[in-house]
Amino acid sequence: MSVIFNPDFHPVSNDPSRHGQTIPVAFNKPAFIGYELEEVQRAIVNHRHISGAGYYTRHCESLLADLYATPVLLVTSCTHALEMSAHLLNLGPEDEVILPSYTFVSTANAFALKGCRLKFADCDAYGQICLDSVQRLVTERTKAVCVVHYAGNSTDMDALLAICQEHQLYLVEDAAQAIGTRYKGRLLGTWGDVACLSFHETKNVTSGEGGALILNRRELLERAHVLREKGTNRTQFFQGLVDKYTWVDIGSSYVMSDMNAAYLFVQLQHLDDIQAKRAQLWERYYRALLPLLPGLNARLFENAPGCDPNYHLFALVFHQPEDRPAFIRFMKERDIVAPFHYVALHDSPMGQAHYPVTETMPGTAALASGLVRLPLFYNMTELEQDCVIHAVQDYATRMLAV
């Protein structure tokens, strides 16, 4: 069987010996613009402030507030932003929260920690929560829906808002993967009552660990400051509004270090450049791998309709679950890391023990058993991407030959 040829794929070298050349390719390398260390050094040496709520925290929050046109607070992680959301909306025991099963555990933990009853919904082919499933799960105890913008994609937000308004439900956006993504021209993160971003090293822009809480209901801002500052009115103290600060509410230490914020500051300034490079890499994968699908017995994970994506990930979805581990092993033999993603939460030990489902989950099952992510990161070289493409090409050729 001859090698599948795609005329739209052009490797960085025409040297035939380059085909099949193997260099290690990591799944992810944190985005690095080039002068992050200079800003971190300024935080330490010039500003002499490395804890939270300093110079870089304020500047990052200003950049994000300009982007989202609403107050944004930097926090230590998206996980903590989600936990703050549950606190701010006063969710508690016996309140039901609807969320997708195909998501990271932090989405569930934020509400489970408050004693909420979790209702898991199915997802569609784009990894987005199924609105029919949401409708079926709503009861008189339902208080909130947490939508997850998986892969920087989105469900039909107009329809989801209508459901929430009809049943008087809060809407929380887990936009961990969705910075800069728009649905019908409107930024994801601006649709719900609150929204949460991640700046983990695997995200498009990073501070190593970190996140942000987007407050679309401005009346929540004062309490959000209290929650972030360990339940104290410390922010009001520094604003000169009180003569001393003290314990006034529940809270925790959710403040991002200013050193982390200094790193993030550079990345946020270059958000458009980062998104453009990721788009270029994503499109190059798409053109090269689309002709290989018959040999792979898989589909490409597409961007959802109506979305202007941020190209957070590129993935294949194998039609037969047994094909996925074989592909991952093949890539590993080429020294390429190509991992799957989530174990469905309703299938997890915790989910089965405490949150049994009544919904059928065909969309969730298809992604949980078939999805594989390919390396994609801002500083990825064409040589690294060529190695990944050639490896996938070789795998598809072998499968056609079987």
Image: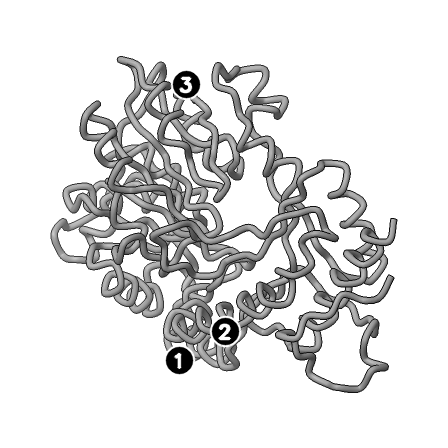
What is the CA distance from the residue labelled 1 to the residue labelled 2?
A: 32 Å
Q: Quarter holding the N terminus? A: bottom right
User: Measured from the top left, where is residue 54 in percent x and y?
Assistant: 33, 65
Mark 3 / mark 1, whichever is N-terminal:
1
Residue type at the position of mark 3: Arg
Q: Which residue is mark 3?
A: 117
Instruction: Tell me the number on the disc at residue 46.
Output: 1
Is label 2 in a helix, a strand or a loop? helix
Q: Which image quarter: residue 31? A: bottom right
Camera sees residue 109: no
User: Measured from the top left, where is residue 11 in percent x and y?
Assistant: 69, 79
How many residues crowd mark 1 within 10 Å: few (<14), some (14–19), many (20+)? few
What is the CA distance from the residue labelled 3 to the residue labelled 1?
A: 48 Å
Mark 1 / mark 2, whichever is N-terminal:
1
Camera sees residue 249: yes
Residue type at the position of mark 2: Lys
User: Measured from the top left, where is residue 124 in percent x and y?
Assistant: 47, 37
Q: Which residue is mark 2?
A: 277
| Residue at the spot 43% in from the left edge and 78% down from the top edge | 42
Residue type at the position of mark 1: Asn
